[in-house]
Image: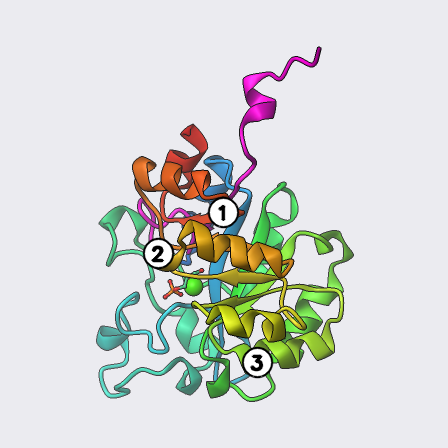
Amino acid sequence: SITVTPAEAAPKVTNIAHRGASHDAPENTLAAMRLAVKARADLVETDVQRTKDGHLVLVHDTTLARTTDVEQVFPDRAPWKISEFTLAEIKRLDAGSWKDPKYRGERVPTLRELLATLAGTRVGLLLEAKAPELYPGIEHAIAEQLGRASAWRGRVRVQSFNWEWIKTYRGLAPKAVLGVLGTPEVGELAEIARYSNQVNPPHASATAEYIAAVHKHGMEVNVWTVDTPDLMRTLISREVDGIITNRPDVLRAL
Ligand code: G3P
Ligand code: CA
């Protein structure tokens, strides 16, 4: 007879730290990424956009107002769009104090800095192209940077709410692991499966039936943003492939 130990019986769910371990540290900073590594997340999720001078930076909103002190440093530059600031200007900003004074001095990281931070770890990356329609051609910069480090092969996934952009990215990176964010109709899944490997919906739309339908089309389901043990257990029982959480430590403890 075969003996199954509890560890083998437990379903393997990818633990994805949303904007890093952002419940405890300021989102999308290297401090949040290091905390996610410490919590033994499998992947960190982050949002990439482009500066005025063409650098890839990690910020969720399309402006710098909520997560930095840009309003104090550049009071005349409203509405503080990322695309209107150079990297040197953005590097002057404090991206930590809004969360907690102990994080004063955290900077907005570049994608390059995040890759360097993760390089010596086992942690991979779920990179969201945020509002790529605002940054024509950003797919070339992203593909170039992710393609450069061969050590990254197998450790990176790219997702976006802009499904057309994901389709374009597929043309540049035939072997990449790609995801669409949101909840496509079941009738749309066959078309999406032609270019995407994942459908990543908000947890409220991830019913057992919906998850099964995505699986039937050969794609994975990673749900967001799930921070309580009860909801994590429910979604695991529905056979999600991954959980995107602000609290990778809580998911790891399950
Ligand atoms: O990775 C899923 C999630 O990040 C999508 O929503 O607004 O947090 O970027 P948002
Ligand atoms: Ca995101």
Residue 242 in sight in this render: yes
Residue 104 image position (x, y, % from top left): 30, 54
Residue bearing mark 1: 240
Identify the magenta region. 1-26
How far, Cα to Cα, is label 1 from label 2? Answer: 37 Å
Determine if the C-beta at disc 1 is less than 8 A from ligand 1: no
Q: Looking at the figure, which quarter contains the C terminus?
A: top left
Residue 57 in sight in this render: no
153 drawn magenta: no
Q: At numbered mark 2, what does the secondary structure look like: helix, strand or loop?
A: loop
Magenta segment's dominant SS is: loop
Q: Name the residue rendered at 65%, 77% in the picture.
A: 169
Q: Nearer the viewer's eye, disc 1 or disc 2?
A: 1
Residue bearing mark 3: 165
Residue 29 image position (x, y, % from top left): 42, 56
Identity, as a three-letter code, of the amino acid under mark 3? Trp
Q: Nearer the viewer's eye, disc 3 or disc 2?
A: 3
Residue bearing mark 2: 105
How far, Cα to Cα, is label 1 from label 3? Answer: 25 Å
9 drawn magenta: yes
Determine if the C-beta at disc 3 is less than 8 A from ligand 2: no
The answer to whether mark 1 and mark 2 are in CB contact below 8 A is no
Q: Name the residue rendered at 67%, 65% in the picture.
A: 146
> How many residues crowd around disc 3 within 10 Å: few (fewer than 14), some, or many (20 or more)?
some
Residue 77 vertical position relative to residue 201 in the rendered view, above or below: below
